[in-house]
Image (tube, rainbow, N blue to C red):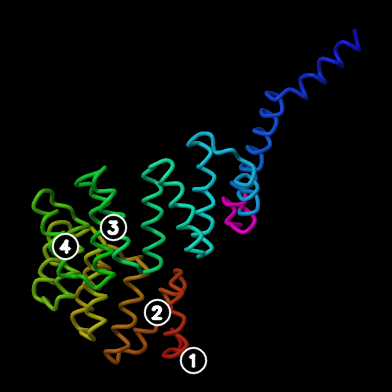
Amino acid sequence: MIKLITGLITLLVMSPFFVSAQNKNQLIALEVQGDTLANRQDYNGALGFYNSVIDQTKFTSPRDYDVMYKRAVAFFQLKEYDKALQDLDVFIEETGDEQGFILKAYVYQDMKAWTEVIAQLDTLDQWYPDNTELIQWRIQVLMDAGMNAEAKEVIQKALASEPNRQIKLYLGLVHYYLAEYKEAFATFDALIKEDSTQLEPYLYASSLCLEDEYYDFAIKYLDAGLTQHPANPSLAFYKGIALYELKQEEEGCRYLRKAFYAGVDDAADYLTEYCFGTED
């Protein structure tokens, strides 16, 4: 009986089906180890396992290409953009999966290849027309590319069909970048009037005032914002800068310290330059 069982095991181990199943389990184990390292942000380590899987897999189903997508993610995180794009081209050609186009857009965005980003968004729009997240992404890309007139057109079209608060904030920024200053701050003021508890209009408006050295106007937005959000570190940081520039150094340094202790690392440079040696 022992000999028969041993012989049966030998036959199973030697059979093509058993070898195939065993190999599949090994590949799954390698992929899991790669995923574990990727989750720990050890992308170099993850690449070693993903490379092993890709070298051994037979690519007999679309599922086999998932590891190629994961390898593209690792390449992207390591800023090896050309290699990421090569894997994504294969992944998209073989699977047509929308995730490939999304990641490809992120790769091109990191490369500041704006035309290529927009091309990927155009493809995604075919699947998800009028998707709010895609619209916001497109607006951000257009603004980053300095295509503010084009961004304004997208914003106005979007707002005509649905009033969206985030897109209204973008409208205020685009007005500003197009030197339409009155319209910009009117947009932020309208958002504040609509809901004074929302933080973003105060931050957007005050940061733009600081950028152009309109410190008195910045203070008005910051004071209003701090009334609603007294513990917000970004508002405290901005107010510290504005006060210091208005020659209220002691009070300005107090707000800068408050921001720094609340976790605003950028406040450290201002404290070193302006407030070293001062006391609360």
Between marks 1 and 3 in the image, the one whose residue lies nearer the viewer: 3
* Amino acid carrying mark 4 in the image: Ile
Marks 2 and 3, how far apart at CA: 43 Å
The reply, left or right, for residue 139 in relation to residue 17 is: left
Answer yes or no: do the residues labelled 2 and 3 have beta carbons within 8 Å?
Answer: no
Towards the viewer: 183 or 149: 149
> What's the mark number on residue 119?
3
Q: Main secondary structure of the magenta part?
A: helix
Q: Which residues are magenta?
A: 36-46
For disc 4, the marked residue is 192
Counting from the top left corner in percent of width and height, residue 232 is at: 35, 66
Answer yes or no: do the residues labelled 3 and 4 have beta carbons within 8 Å?
Answer: no
Residue at x 25%, y 56% (from the top left corner): 136
Marks 1 and 4, how far apart at CA: 38 Å
Marks 1 and 3, how far apart at CA: 54 Å
Counting from the top left corner in percent of width and height, residue 237 is at: 36, 76
Between marks 1 and 4 in the image, the one whose residue lies nearer the viewer: 4
Marks 1 and 2, how far apart at CA: 14 Å
For disc 2, the marked residue is 256
Marks 4 and 2, how far apart at CA: 25 Å
